[in-house]
Amino acid sequence: MKRFLILTLAIVMLLALGMGGMFTSTTPAFAQARYGLQKSAAVQTSTALVLPAGTWVYGIEIFADGASSFMGVYNCATLGTVSDALVKDEIGEATQYDTQTKLYPKPIYFGTGVTVVITTGVGFILYGPHP
């Protein structure tokens, strides 16, 4: 009887400590969280190299802190090289205090870097790992 009680307690402790997971093929959620979709720091002025070369962008977002807010996203490393040929996407919001989010069906690869040109708004880049 004593042996059965000790064995039962040992099994309960193993399950409580997460050792039961060694018999399944899943990993803990916290181990995978770092590979999910991330949001860049807020961009309020035109900024060169918001994210480095080799970034996969999954979408863009803008919060209009003034009327007619606009943001353009370019595949370049400096503001001096911004041109129509390097523009990847644009987003805008006409109504103050409204937000606009655009998620792409397929992420866009920025080989040179992510540079943002913005007027009267707060922009964010939604980025993540290679798809």
Image (cartoon, grey):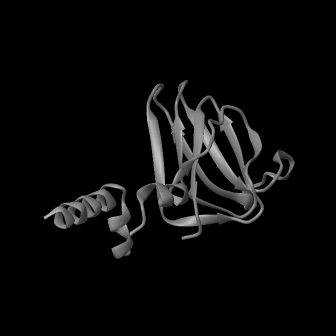
> Left or right of 64: which side holds 41?
right
Residue 17: x and y in percent read: 36, 56
In front: 121, or 5?
A: 5
Tell me which corner region of the image, top left, top right, bottom left or bottom right, holds residue 25.
Answer: bottom left
Indicate the quadrant containing the N terminus: top left, top right, bottom left or bottom right: bottom left
Q: Is residue 39 visible from the viewing direction of this image?
A: yes
Tell me which corner region of the image, top left, top right, bottom left or bottom right, holds residue 27.
Answer: bottom left
Q: Residue at x 17, y 66 (%)?
A: 4
Q: Residue at x 46, y 46 (%)?
A: 101
Indicate the quadrant containing the C terminus: top left, top right, bottom left or bottom right: bottom right
In front: 72, or 11?
A: 11
> Left or right of 77: which side holds 56?
left
> Left or right of 130: which side holds 14?
left
Residue 39: x and y in percent read: 56, 46
User: Which residue is at the far right?
Assistant: 80
Considering only vertical position in the picture, is 25 above or below 80?
A: below
Q: Is residue 24 visible from the viewing direction of this image?
A: no
Q: Residue at x 36, y 60 (%)?
A: 18
Residue 62: x and y in percent read: 53, 39
Q: Residue at x 48, y 51 (%)?
A: 102
- The mark tally for this picture is 0
Residue 55: x and y in percent read: 67, 61
In front: 4, or 131?
A: 4
Considering only vertical position in the picture, is 39 above or below 109?
A: above
User: Which residue is at the far left?
Assistant: 1
